[in-house]
Amino acid sequence: MSKPSDGRPAKVTPLHGAQPQSQPPMTPEPSPPTIAAFREVPRTGVIFVTSEARRRGFDPVAADWCNLGQGMPEADTLPGAPPRQLGVTIDPADQEYAPVPGLWELREAIAGLYNNLFRRGMPSQYSAENVSVSGGGRTALTRVAASLGQINLGHFLPDYTAYEELLDVFRLFSPIPILLEGDRGYAFTAADLRREILGRGLGAILASNPGNPTGKVVGGEDLAEWVGVARELDCALILDEFYSHYVWRPDLAAQGGISTAARYVEDVDRDPVVILDGLTKNWRYPGWRVTWTIGPRKVIDAVASAGSFLDGGGSRPLQRAAIPLLEPATTLAETRAIQAEFGKKRARMLNGLRDLGFGIDLPPEGTFYVWASAQHLPPSISDGMSFFRAALDRKVIAVPGEFFDVNPGRRRGGRPSRFRRHLRFSFGPPMAKLELALERIKELIDDAARQG
């Protein structure tokens, strides 16, 4: 769930016939004056790297840049995928505000999709009242965070960069970090979960699954056991499943290649399982900003109440247009196309980075990212930030690993990050961009080696 820019326009129309500059001015812009009432809000990793790239002339539509830092998939039609939705007809009634929890018809469609694909034959079924719709993944996460009480909230290291500020801005709960180890393949068993919940007194766990950036998937029987532990110990599982259709583990192919905790919930209103997803990644419509939270009705009531003061609800026309995209047959066709095309890109990126000398703790089991270590590259580019800055000179963007070392409020101090050697490389862009990026990275490494 990430934007391609820092919010400034990509291009400026020149005045009075002046020619646009191909590069920004070399002299840095003066810092704006400080306003005492406001704090400095840190940028998430993707926004930071995109902003730095803009200083070097990056334009999201420029053909000569390779953005392997992007957190969105290519959005064009894929072979075998349903046709892309290219227009929205607005009913006069949809000029009004949408209900804060979302259009009832869309909420019904989301509940029906989960029941049809994941809960057939189960006595407890999701209803529209188990769903809240929001305008983007971070909006959904913010609503959930604002609904939490005075608890200890466990979160993993590494994990999604936007969690850092989210876990700091709400002061009712206390964020508790849990380190995942690369030499264990970032595995975390149900026994590990039980130990952390009991030992640290956790009231909830927040996690991306599949994991961003590592690509680790907790799925199948492992995920069923996670849900069982959460049910038994009454610890809420808040699962960011935005990459749940990008699953590469062969043992999950029998489940249609979709990994979701919704399969293992026994009672939709009692099991403390809260799932976040949306059109952003799994349907490849990031610009629509149509996302949802699904969980027990009491939780959904609280989330909707939080939305009433946080954001006021999402786009009514786009919610209406989203309903046909959630037909089960349409969803499965899109998922098959994603797995066929992104599977090829996964193999190319993974093998290409290995051939160039990057270390891979875990081949991605999910997502469209490769989490790689630069430790064995030439010394001048053997950490994530140094590599990132050198790669910008080659018009290649990646995200340094230290941004995923989620550290709310800098409570763990300013010591060097455990992930400072790592980078996250996206295979979200088209294959041609990946090939060009790998070629440029090879040139960068070769030049660094020659320079000693």
Image (cartoon, rainbow, N blue to C red):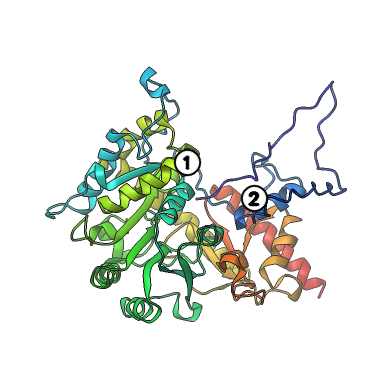
Kind of residue at badge 1: Asp
Q: On the picture, is 9 further left or further right than 190?
A: right
Give the number of the disc on residue 66.
2
Tell me if I can see residue 68 in this picture.
no
Mark 2 crowdedness (10 Å alpha carbons): few <14, some 14-19, many ≥20: many
Q: Position of residue 326 (x, y in %)?
A: 31, 39
- Label 2, secondary structure: give it: strand
Q: Which comes sooner in the sequence, label 2 or label 1?
A: 2
Indicate the secondary structure of the residue bearing disc 1: loop
- Residue 311, numbered circle: 1
Who's the residue at 38% across and 52% down the image?
276
* Residue 99 percent coordinates (x, y): 36, 34
**Residue 34 in view (yes/no):** yes
Give residue 373's position: percent from left, percent from top: 60, 72
Question: In 3D space, how far apart are the residues under numbered discs 2 and 1 (Cα atoms)?
Answer: 34 Å
Q: Residue furthest right?
A: 27
Eye-nearest disc, 2 or 1: 1
Check disc 2 and give the amino acid type.
Cys
